[in-house]
Amino acid sequence: MIYGHDPRTGETVGAALPETDSAGVDRIVSAAAAAGAAWRATPAAERAVALEAVADALSAHVDELWRLADQETALGEGRLRGEVARAAGQFRLFAEVIRDGGYLEAIIDHADPSLTPPRPDVRRVKQALPGVVAVFAASNFPFAFSVAGGDTASALAAGCAVVVKAHPGHPNTSERVAKIVREALPNPDLLGLVQGMQAGVDLVKHPSVVAAGFTGSVAGGKAIQKLIDERETPIPFYGELGSVNPVVVLPSAPAKEVATGFAASLTLGVGQFCTNPGLLFVPEGDELRKAIVEAVEGTTGGPMLAERIRDNYLGGVERLSQLQLLAEGKPGEGSWAVTPKVFTTDLDTFAAKLPAIGEECFGPASIVVTYRDVADLRPVLERLDGSLTASVHSTEPQEAAEVVEVLGRKAGRLIWNGWPTGVAVCWAMHHGGPWPAATTTTTSVGATAIERWVAPTAYQDWPEELLPDELKDANPLSIPRRVDGRLQVS
């Protein structure tokens, strides 16, 4: 049986839920595949209406949902209300995306017999993957990266059915969200839900599953990739994994503002963000270090989402304890509570301890690395693993010349005078990065997340009446297209 737990007390909460057995997984995936065949053929305008209905349903149930999720996550009303709104917003964004049609990248090259060799009529468009998308829910976002998260919203928008493997940290919340979403969809089988570790194994190995999305640890991502490698037919795996999100503070940056922002970003959500700042590079000197100590000592820890996550954090802190402890916050309250901790070392010592010292410690822990000269940073930054984000703090842009180029190769999102926690859901957002931040160059947040669940098909000399509407000469859907090399907006 699967049980939810209150991170504040460790006690079980909610109903005991059965693990989904192999036969159950097969039944759920098969039903999703059958529903997905009709959904894939449904016009984008109709799919958009359904996505907006899901968004409305989530918003209508926010009072119920945040209370249920708080019992299993202890994340609090403000954070959870905001997250329901974010989840609903993602569905609304993808309704816009598929109405726009640009993501289909429709291209028409009319026949040209004058060329050598003659060119046939070739038309290309992206279409939904023909099958079920498996989604592995995240621990730290029970709504926005879970059953009703961005992977689910973007896959449904593309025209795929989805089966989610619920996270054990919030099983009852997952069940309720799934029910609400199903009731808003034209066919409830378009969204399936399975519970239990073995169910996740069975899900990713099911022959009707054509792609998988995952947000979690490097170890978890590697385990899923291994299962995919064992399949008779390989499938794409889109994983968002570990990230330390380096922050480079340059000499002109204001000390107090940097320290305050750092402490807030580090401890937001008890540090349980894939984008919390795990490395802070600062110039030598007492002013900024003192400001960081004061800011961090003013923070308070809290309960982590699961006992296993708490234990992993304590293990990470033990690994970092080979460095000098610079500051720590006040202890949090609750059975799975932890204390924010910031360690420090100089640049040479940090470099000598790479790569192990540069691994992610998921939670409110970070390393402050002091440097003498900005020019000394580049060779050390070059040795860091990939991250979702990299940030620079400065009031003099020319100071960044030594580091900006290398950071641009190490992270998927570059931030100027800001902090990485908080990922806007918008058209331009990219939430990914070089390994181990992600397994591919795609994004799991923002409009282009839909690209993961579509694949191109080219039609050569195809009869007009058999072409998809997106490729007909009259452009009945009025979508952007490239025709004979020229982009046409409609």
Image (cartoon, rainbow, N blue to C red):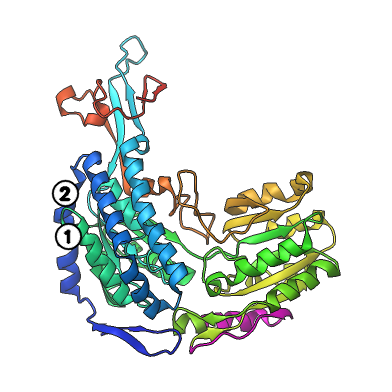
Quadrant hosting residue 271: bottom right
Image quadrant holding the N terminus, namely: bottom left
Mark toward the start of the polypeptide (1 vs 2): 2
x and y, in percent, of residue 9 in the image:
43, 90
User: In the depicted view, which residue is nearer to us: 351 or 53?
Assistant: 53
Q: Where are the magenta residues, as a range?
A: 312-335
- Provide residue 397's location: percent of width, then percent of height: 75, 45
Q: How many marks on residues? A: 2
Task: Give neighbour class at mark 1: few <14, some 14-19, many 20+ (Cα, 10 Å).
Answer: many
Give the x, y percent position of residue 381: 70, 58
Q: Is residue 102 magenta?
A: no
Observer-side mark, 1 or 2, equals 1
**How crowded is the residue under tag 2: few (<14 C-alpha within 10 Å), some, or many (20+)?**
some
Q: Is residue 189 left or right of residue 488?
A: left
Q: Secondary structure at mark 1?
A: helix
- The three-letter code of the residue at mark 2 reads Ala
Q: Is 279 on the left or on the right of 283, as rendered?
A: left
Look at the picture and state if 47 lies above or below 213: above
Q: Nearer the viewer, residue 315 or 265?
A: 265
Task: Name the amino acid type tagged 1.
Answer: Asp
Q: Is residue 325 magenta?
A: yes
Whether 403 is drawn above or below 357: the answer is: above
Mark carried by residue 189: 1
Position of residue 252 measured from the top left corner of the image (x, y, whole percent): 81, 54
Which quadrant, please, contains the C terminus?
top left
The disc label shown at residue 37, or none = 2
Nearer-the-camera pick, 305 or 243: 305
| Residue 61 circle label | none
The residue that appears at 75% across and 75% down in the rendered structure is: 293
Q: Name the quadrant containing residue 202.
A: bottom left
Q: CA distance from mark 1 to mark 2?
A: 11 Å
